[in-house]
Amino acid sequence: MKIFVTGIGVVSAIGLNAEENLCSLRSGVTGIRRSSVYNLMLGEVKLCNEQLIQLLNLPNEDFSRTTLLSILAAKEAWGKNKIVDDIRTGIISSTSVGGLDRIEKYYFESQTNKSSESYKLMTHDNGRTTERVAAELGVSGYIGTISTACSSGANAIMQGARLIEANKLDRVIVGGCDPLAIFDIKGFSSLNIYDQEICKPFDESRKGLNLGEGAAFLVLENDQSISITDNTPLCLLSGWDNATDAFHQTASSANGKGARLAMINALAKANITSEKINYVNAHGTGTGNNDLSESIALKTVFGDNIPPFSSTKGFTGHTLAAAGAIEAVYCVQAIRSQTILPNLNFSTPMTETGMIPEKTFRPGTQIEYVLSNSFGFGGNCTCLIFGKAN
Amino acid sequence: MNVSELNPASELIEPDYSEFIPAMDRRRMSKVIKMAIACSIDCLKQAGLDQPDGIIVGTSMGCCVHTKNFLDKIIGANDGPLSPTSFIVSTHNTIAGQISLLLKNHGYNITHTQNSLSFEQALMDGILCIQNGYSNVLIGGADEEEDTIYNMKARLNDETIHLTHGASFFILSGKAASPASVNLIDVGSFGLINNPSKIIMRFLDSNNLSSEEIDLVLYANTEHKKTDELKMIFGQKKIFDYQKISGTYYTNSAFAMNYGIDILRLRSHPVFGNSIGKVLVCNNLIPENLGLILIDNKNQLG
């Protein structure tokens, strides 16, 4: 059974929609800037909540930023689609913090001023964010949320494909979102894994990651749905897999076992050999541990024929649960524009592997299959493969 | 089967965790992780399994106690250095992740977090895994109580609920693992709905069942009052509010499934009577969300 991708939407530090994101990738301009508030390099979406509410023409509710960014990206992906009886439509989103950006505000206020507004403490429920997005699109029925830390977005996409494959749904909006919550900014700081400059994925001198924020959604459809919507397929979601590293709560194993398993099984699911992959959008966070572990896993899977690969996190920062979804949109765009996407700030290969990522935006490349990696805390490793639609 | 109703003094019944978790790991684990791991190990033991092919967890609030702890540390640190201990175990998938770490399991691993439907969605995922050829899947629902950063009573608009916590885990398998196995017939997750009765009827219909064929309905809703609709559908069949024994947490439908399985295994119940063959868990805890789990005591799947 074919799973078609027929819509994409994305908001990140490098743009408020898919076209703006691609434009930034083309011109090689990063969205990561020094935040004066935290004195940290962050990939912020350049609109505050009030501006997002205005842009989306929403009522003045107590929205979490997660919900606002999600609605923006989901609406772009959804486009002119309509809810009709003959198409069983669902939504699966993903997030790691949900509405914690509001909770932390109210909680900090209540702890410092001792004022009690506990009735406001209702947004730290990941599912609520997805329900609000569903309501905005008019979706009811299967409304789900996945939370597997930094692989969440990829798992939501996989989950949508699996429900279509099992004939539970005909069409599904899939994706993920994370805002820059103080919780995460302080959390990753406590782990000492920030690069104080823009991150350098796969570089020998890489120092760590930059946090980012954003949201991205894709519309997946089966044949029957397309016969009714008449949507043009942008590409296919050809393969997927989820495996576990089972090594450490926050670190990846030296041999990249989880990553290797996810890639090998996703290739098997797509029913293709590794030589068919023309571009890999790596997880590539810029941390010493991830990039080495992922490189070793890539070497194990692809041997001496590693396809062009890059991490786009030098543009967006690490957007946590949104990363897998944002990068899935970039993969769709890579296929659509037959382009390999660049990896910023690379100069020196790692001594352990000698691998060199793609450094320039390279249009005019024949791209039939693209592989996207997402790994997270808890050892979650998910791999998606997108294929050209005819 | 000596289950009594909750009273204000009721407390969580916990096993001796030292039987399940090494002391060094146990110290750092929050309640939800300990509950989930103890259930998981017990489940695998009962099924005679070393490793499941997949681990699927449904949890609404995840590791919210550690989330709150880290927020407190942020306040306390006043921009000074912070210990990452609470942060790294605060993600929702820490539960499934810690189970995989303990078992050294490299298989499918996922966490569903859709408030009151988290468990039903985990269960649907488990069925997909079995249909895709997995021999077995470890699956569970777990939530811990934490009401300082999430006001569940306000969310459910019901000040009378008894907030609790719990974990219930199961092994799903394509074949009956033992004579004590029960049959999971179907699961449904329906969000943002306005007519639960219609969906219940359609769900039964799609399973070629009439409402008369359901022997027991285990239900949950808020304010414990909306039984009229259920009574309309199920007539004189027995309906029971499982929150009277589980208390309220978002994944308590996992408890209801466990309770239903216990009743099916015994085929009788002091209150519900004999010859209970089919049980429907009808989770309408959030008024616009409906979860349905249908089980019977035929020992074959499908």
Image: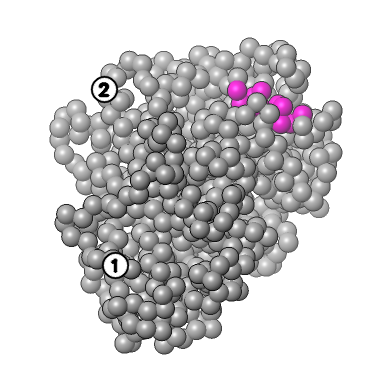
Quarter holding residue A123: top left
Query: Residue A83 shows which numbered tag?
Result: none
Front position in the image: B87 or A71: B87
Q: Position of residue B289 (x, y in %)?
A: 38, 63
Tell me the residue at 68%/29% (across/down). Answer: A255
| 1 and 2 marks on the same chain | yes
Front position in the image: B272 or A175: B272
Q: Position of residue A47 (x, y in %)?
A: 43, 32
Task: Indicate the chain on which mark 1 is placed.
Answer: B
Instruction: Magenta stretch: give its range.
Output: A289-299
Tell me the residue at 63%/32% (across/down). Answer: A283
The overriding secondary structure of the stretch rendered in magenta is helix
Tell me the residue at 53%/77% (across/down). Answer: B298
Residue lying at the far front in this picture: please name it: B19
Query: Residue B76 shows which numbered tag?
Result: 2
Label 1 element class: loop
Q: Position of residue B204 (x, y in %)?
A: 48, 79
Q: Is residue B74 left or right of residue B130?
A: left
- The residue labelled by disc 1 is B2
Residue A102 can be seen in this image: no
Quarter holding residue B168: bottom left
Per the image, is B226 magenta? no
Question: Looking at the picture, which amino acid does disc 2 mark?
Answer: Gly
Q: Position of residue A83 (x, y in %)?
A: 52, 65
In this view, A99 is above or below A28: below
Front position in the image: A322 or B115: B115
Q: For the image shown, how many numbered marks are present on the structure? A: 2
Q: Earlier in the sequence, mark 1 or mark 2?
A: 1
In this view, A204 is above or below A386: above
In this view, B125 is above or below A352: below
